[in-house]
Every structure is written in C-alpha cells, then in structure tokens.
Image: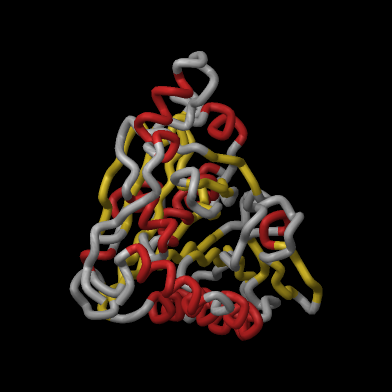
Amino acid sequence: MGEQKITTPKSDSNDASHLCRKLKSIGPDAFRNTVLKKVKLAETVTLLEVEAPLIAAAGRPGQFIVVRPNEYAERIPLTISNTDKEAGTITIIFQEVGRTTRELGLVEEGDCLPDLAGPLGTPTEIENYGRAVCVGGGVGIAFLRPIVAALRDAGNHVTTILGARDKSLLILEEEMRLISNDLLVTTDNGSHGVKGFVTDALKNILDSDKPVNIVFAIGPMPMMRAISQLTKPYGVKTIVSLDPIMIDGTGMCGGCRVTVGGATKFTCVDGPDFDGHEVDWDELRSRKLAYAEEEKIALERMGGGK
C-alpha cells in the first residue's frame, strides 16, 4: 500500500500544542505532561523527556506508565527509562511499531500528552546479588537502563550485554557503558561489536570461571525466551520483563494475564518482572498475536501498512 498522508480528526482538542496551551491557561499545575525534549535515537526509536513531577518522584526501576498521545488514541504502556526527581521529568523511549506508537512519534517538543498515568507495576527487586548480567535487545535496552544503574548502586558487579540486528538500531551504548562494570555489544550482522547474538555472549560468560548470580533480560520475546532456556541448565535465576497486550494497567481488565509457574498472573500488577524459567512462553506468544490482523488494518488506514 502506498504511503499516504497521516490524518487525524479535525478538532482543536486533538491538536497537542493547542491542547497544551488551553489547559495550562487554567493554571500552572492544571496540566504538566509537557514534552520538553525529543530525540531520534534510531530510525524508528524516539526518546521523549516529559514533565511529570509526581511520577518522577515516585517512579522506581522496572515500573511503567500508560499514555495516550492524543484524545483519539488507545492507551499503551511504556516502561520508564529514566526519572529526574529534581527536574520533575521522566524519560520514555519507544519504537514505532503500531498505530499508537506512530502517533506518539508525531508529538513535538512543547506539546502536551492528554493522558499520562503512573508509575504502575511492581518495581524490580534490587539487592546485592553479587555478579549480575543484564541483557538488553533492541528498544529493551532503554528499559534495562534504570535496572543496571540500581544494581550497580547496590554493590553488584554488573556485566551488560547489548544486542541489535544492525549498528544503526543500537541505542544508549555509551550511557550503558558508563553505568556498567563491563559492556559487551553484539550485532546479528557484525556491523558493530561482536557478530552474533546476545545468547552467544551470555553463554561464554556462563561457561567462564566467574560465577553469575542472576541474569536480567529485557528485549524481544524470542530473545528473552532463548536466554531463559540457556540459563536454566546452569541454575542461574533469570528475570524477564514481559509486555503482553495491556489495556487498563491496574489489574481491572485482565488483558495482560500470563501463566507463570502454572498460575495466572497479571503483568500490570504482579509484574512486569517474572522468573523466565517459569513463564509459559507459548501461551504468551499466542496472546500477543491475538490482534495482529486488527493492528495491520489500523496501520494501513493510517498510511503505514506494508
């Protein structure tokens, strides 16, 4: 389908810039979800720094927010990549893969987000485990960032492994290098770092004479599943961050349910962190594909389908 101009309903309330000015005129504290900074990290990956003082004050590693980019968009969950309590800001990093993330990518500096709720979810359990290996793939690197920093602050020796299909898709390399004790980079095609997959790098570490006490993995579902399968024979606890379909974000709708250790869990309130060795990966994959056709149609209507 040919590229078409992206259109949205003609309404003053749908114009993010106009909406921001209108609501701020009510009072300085009436609406504070202003986008202060926008950076393109890769072709389809964008960073937004948003004014959200209450979320910034309460947010902890592993938690997420639910956001709507405009009044006509659906609600989507995004993990908080960074918080600045003094500045009262949060950073979210997202990849444009569906209609709503593409709409969020149209937001510019100075615009306001009409709906922003959080922090949601259970924070990542941070303690001094000893030696921790943190594996990030694709945009999952952004979600791993606060966890790596917190583990390092807790006294862990943190080895970070970053992976991407190509160098152009790798994000936050230097930032992650600064907060890690060791950093390894892999690319599928060998365009940067070591050619291969993150599982190859992790296996080399697991086979070394230095014990690994825990592994954290965030990235595409196939990557997290492969890492969980790799670490299980070694008996190394592996924590993954799941991202099933989510609507409510507070445990009311049940859309984000997953099976972990034979029991039903809600990702929004029981997670998003779970033991990767106990996740029913086949069920999770099936549930994530439930609305694949509808998502394709929504993109095509927006002019972004292929």
Name the residue: 63% across, 58% down: 247
Name the residue: 47% across, 32% down: 33
Name the spot of residue 119 as percent of width and height, x first: 61, 41
- Quadrant where the image shows the C terminus: bottom left
Residue 207 vs residue 200: left or right?
Answer: right
Considering every residue shown, the one lying at the far right of the view is: 263
- Whether residue 127 is visible to the viewer of this picture, yes or no, is no
Colour scheme shown: secondary structure
Name the spot of residue 1 as percent of width and height, x first: 26, 76
Count the numbered circles shown. 0
- Depth check, front residue: 38 or 200: 38
Residue 261 vs residue 100: left or right?
Answer: right
Q: Which quadrant holds residue 50? A: top left
Name the residue: 47% across, 76% down: 223
Considering every residue shown, the one lying at the far left of the view is: 191
Name the spot of residue 172 as percent of width and height, x first: 32, 53
Residue 51 vs residue 37: left or right?
Answer: right
Name the residue: 52% across, 51% down: 79
Residue 165 vs residue 198: left or right?
Answer: left
- Depth check, front residue: 49 or 237: 49
Above or below, 192 against 33 in this view is below
- Depth check, front residue: 111 or 276: 111
Q: Which quadrant holds residue 43? A: bottom left
